[in-house]
Amino acid sequence: MRLLPQRLVPPMLRRSRDRGSAEIGVALVAAAVVAGSLVGTGVARTAVEVTDGVTWLADSPTGQVVEINPSTLEPQSAALVGLPGQQLVLSQDRGRLVVANRATGALTSIDLATLLASGRRDATPGDAVTVLLDHGRAFLVDRGVGLVASIDPVTLATRGRVWLAPKGLRDATIDGKGSMWVASGDDALTRLTWSEASLAFTSEETHALTRVGTTVRLVAHERGVTAVSPSTGAIVQVGTGHDLVSAAPQMRGPISPAQSSSSSLVPVSVPERDVVVIVRDGATVSEVRTAALGCPRPGAPVELHGVVYVPCPSTGRVIRLDGNGAKAGPDILTGKGAPELVVDDGALLVNVPGSTKGVKVSADGTTTSFVRFDETIKPADVDRDPAKDDKKAEEKAKKDREKDRDRPKKDPPRYDPGSGGLPTNTPDGPKPTHTSTRTTTPTPGGTGGSEEPPSAPTPAPKAPVITDARATGSGSASVTWTQPGAGASSYDVLVGGSVAVTVSGSTTSTTLTGLATGSTVQITVRGTYAGGRTVASAPAAVTPAGAPGAPGGVALSETARSRTSATFAVSWNAAGDNGSAVTRYAVSATGAHGSDTWSGSTRSASVTVPCDSGSASCGSVSVSVTATNAVGTGPAGTASAAVSPTPGLALPPAGATVVASQVSEGADDEFDYERVTTLTLTPPAGWASFGGVCSVRYTTAYTSGPATVPCSATSLQVTSTRLSEASRRSNHGVVIRAYDPATPGTYVESATFTWSLVWPIDVCGTGGKICP
């Protein structure tokens, strides 16, 4: 692994009035052998790239996708894939369109030759899911569950083994060489390749990301990626051949980078700061203040032919910038609506959902207005039955035959052999013979016939009736229905207008799983029979429940501190109930020397943790708060704080008389080498009540005894040792020292108490005999 340099921000930023630039030092660039990072929270990307010569635009206000003829710039077909108002995001490649419904999480693969849905799958709602199409391959990126999967572009079914990020997935993208770059929550960026032989991803290289931040966005290049972090302002480019590390001070908060760009010109919008950041040639970072250019809160930019196009949702325009951040041409006016940018075979299409007009920008910068939506074009139902199309054609032919049958009948023309076989009884001469298309059935015993009556069409079953729909477990709901009249061969159960599950005609109930929690969904049922489908049932509203979210705003403050414990007040914000009311909160507090718990229905608590019994130190305290509802217990909100310093003790007065007298025991003979001395202690009140430690210091080497004594003790026994056989007298002494264990370097001592011992000694004769 290559580590990110610790210093991200260049030492000097040279600013101009409206654009700031930061020159990257050579040493800094040389040190930046790093990989980028990936998508976390931020503004959704709106730019779409189309590479197969056919242009499809999303029209979220109507729930349709519209095909634009690239030659005439006119709409030529449409398909209905969602409900009005649901945000639709398109991925397109090689005659196939994949539509992601942000509202429901449903993914739909559409065969553009037939405008039929060939595959569906459910995914996480919102902007956590991205479908990447690359030269006939399809990959699913789901940041909600932390996986990257290869999927069949036709059926959207998972192929082979998925790549999982245990600590979360920040983003993934594919560069122009087909390499998959993924950033995981463990601050690692990995380049993956997909093997068709083993049906698995292979890790080709991994880079460590340090001090970049937890929220990053990725821009793909022809080779390599550039990562930008709104949490630190860091800009990291890797795999391009001229890797770099820099920073943009204004790139903080939600950001919206280009989906892809040239590695030499990377634009990033910062809507809340009215700024577009442009990284040019791997050496200059410009910060363009777009509000002064009539573009507050800029949207996701696009880089095309060296020009940066920036959509301005609030002012109905697109501005053009060059690599230095200066205006590169006149604004492109789009009227009302939020413009979306679509790159189509070297040209830029400005799509404005809900509007009838769009704008094409050619490679030379010229613009052409085109019609993007035509109400007269009936959108195709991508879920229709192909057999029904054949049935319609057959019914049309039948109606034509019936019209022919009902025409007034005339005598058949007569032929004159002399006329060469041409009719002779027509007013204007010979006419072509009229041939009837009537079908007759011979009658018994005769040559005549009667017309065969057309068979009556099979009546369509009535719409199913939902009799019960309710939330069950986490993110699930049960639905039960009845079918009036003739039963259907199968039933589709739809959530928010998208098919969630199909069951057999003998089944009239099912359980839906994987539903978004805490939000109301509309469930409908429709039946399928030989002639088509019923209309959908009346919708049933259900709010699937889940375990509560993590309580936010967890805070703790110390309310009491003693030498044995510390007490904290804990407070927090209400947890999101996810569709089921919170019934209980639980608090767990952990300190260095013990823990405490609390549970209740309020959003505040008091917890007490013990301190060290000797030093009275508590260290720090961490708390976690969880919420519980009928579904279960959700994730914890956490906080931590240091405990205040140990309260100090007032030391007793120094020099006080603590030892008052002594009595020694022992025989005065030649075997008398040790004596036990009992000291009488009379500690003053300040010493006797001292809550710290009283230790004993012996002033001579030949006196020993306990190392400590209770500060309120009234006696102390020590042992005195004879220095030698020749010693006659020895002096001894003790001092009582008082100190606080929390501050062992600070102490006071009592007055020194000394005493002397006389030992028997006498030398008799010449042999050195000790006499009594």
Image (tube, helix red, strand yellow):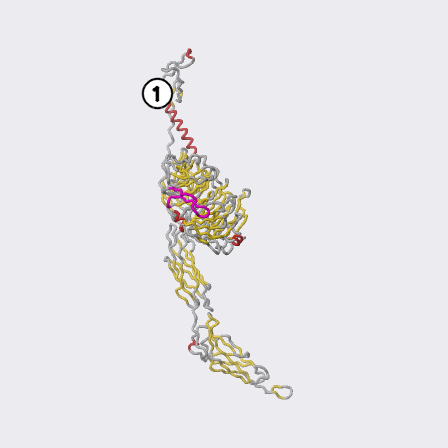
Q: Residue 346 or 725: which is nearer the viewer?
A: 346
Q: Is residue 605 left or right of residue 226?
A: left
Is residue 316 in the magenta section?
Answer: yes
Q: Residue at x 42, y 77 (%)?
A: 685
Q: Which residue is the extreme one toward the right?
A: 766
Q: Is residue 146 above or below residue 440?
A: below
Q: Is residue 418 above or below residue 337?
A: above
* Image spot of residue 385 (x, y percent): 42, 35
Q: Secondary structure at mark 1?
A: loop
Q: Is residue 508 visible?
A: no
* Image spot of residue 123 (x, y percent): 44, 45
Q: Residue 536 or 3: which is nearer the viewer?
A: 3
Write down the quadrant of residue 107 in the picture: top left
Report the magenta residues as a range. Answer: 314-334
* Image spot of residue 621 (x, y percent): 44, 62
Amino acid at dot 1: Pro
State the residue position of label 1.
408
Write down the quadrant of residue 626 in the picture: bottom left
Count neighbours of disc 1 (C-alpha within 10 A) and say few if under 14, some if 14 to 19, many if 20 or more: few
Q: Which residue is the extreme one toward the bottom?
A: 765
Q: Is residue 409 visible?
A: yes
Query: How many numbered circles does the render carry?
Result: 1
Majority secondary structure in the magenta region? loop
* Image spot of residue 190 (x, y percent): 52, 49
Is residue 527 in the magenta section?
Answer: no
